[in-house]
Image (cartoon, rainbow, N blue to C red):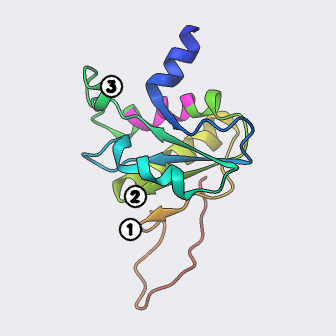
Amino acid sequence: MTSLRLDHDRWFLRAGRRSNPRLTVLAVPWAGSGTAAYHGLADQLPADVDLWMLRLPGREVRRQEPLATTMSELAGPAAAACAEALTGDFVLFGHSSGALIAFDVARRLRREHGRLPPCSPSARSPHPTCRRATRPSTTCPWNAS
């Protein structure tokens, strides 16, 4: 194993490891959570979709590392790791505060690495640029610039 590979393993837990996935879903855990929150998701995805889970500093196998105290400390290195490791089509998925992390990672991927996932679904956290509407809406402009 090379040091580059070890670094990727530090950032990502890969479930399934499909040989030629059509799409990779990168699941981002919420505050206080880790990759275990998404372990069951791999079995729910189509056979040609791979699941990667972001390993956050200070949690699980990275528990000896200091926790990130700012979004920049977390999203910057995470985006760099994504840019190197995710070579095919991918989407970012985040739940709650994980959605905010996923948004910032996507923004940095675009600005710093020239890559942007085609979409970044989130669960239970509106997009940071969305304002609360008087009635629920299923649409919201998404601009990661």
State the SS at label 2: strand
Q: From which residue to which does the magenta span run?
A: 74-81
Q: Which residue is mark 2?
A: 95
Please indicate whether residue 17 sits to the left or right of residue 19 in the image.
Answer: left
In this view, 140 is above or below 55: below
Return the disc, 2 or 1, that comes first in the chain's sequence. Answer: 2
Return the disc, 3 or 2, that comes first in the chain's sequence. Answer: 3
Number of the label disc, if any, that sits on residue 61: 3
* Residue 5 percent coordinates (x, y): 57, 17
Which residue is found at the position 54% from the left and 81% from the top? 138
Alpha carbons under labels 1 and 3: distance apart: 27 Å
In this view, 48 is above or below 96: above
Which residue is found at the position 65% from the left and 35% from the top? 86
Residue type at the position of mark 3: Val
Number of the label disc, if any, that sits on residue 124: 1
Which residue is found at the position 43% from the left and 85% from the top? 133
| Marks 3,2: beta carbons within 8 A | no
Residue type at the position of mark 2: His
* Residue 35 percent coordinates (x, y): 38, 41
Please indicate whether residue 66 sits to the left or right of residue 97 in the image.
Answer: left
Give the crowd class for mark 1: few <14, some 14-19, many >=20 residues within 10 Å: few
Badge nearest the viewer, 1 or 3: 3
| Marks 1,3: beta carbons within 8 A | no
Which quadrant of the figure contains the N terminus? top right
* Residue 121 percent coordinates (x, y): 54, 62
State the SS at label 3: helix
| Marks 2,1: beta carbons within 8 A | yes
Residue type at the position of mark 1: Arg
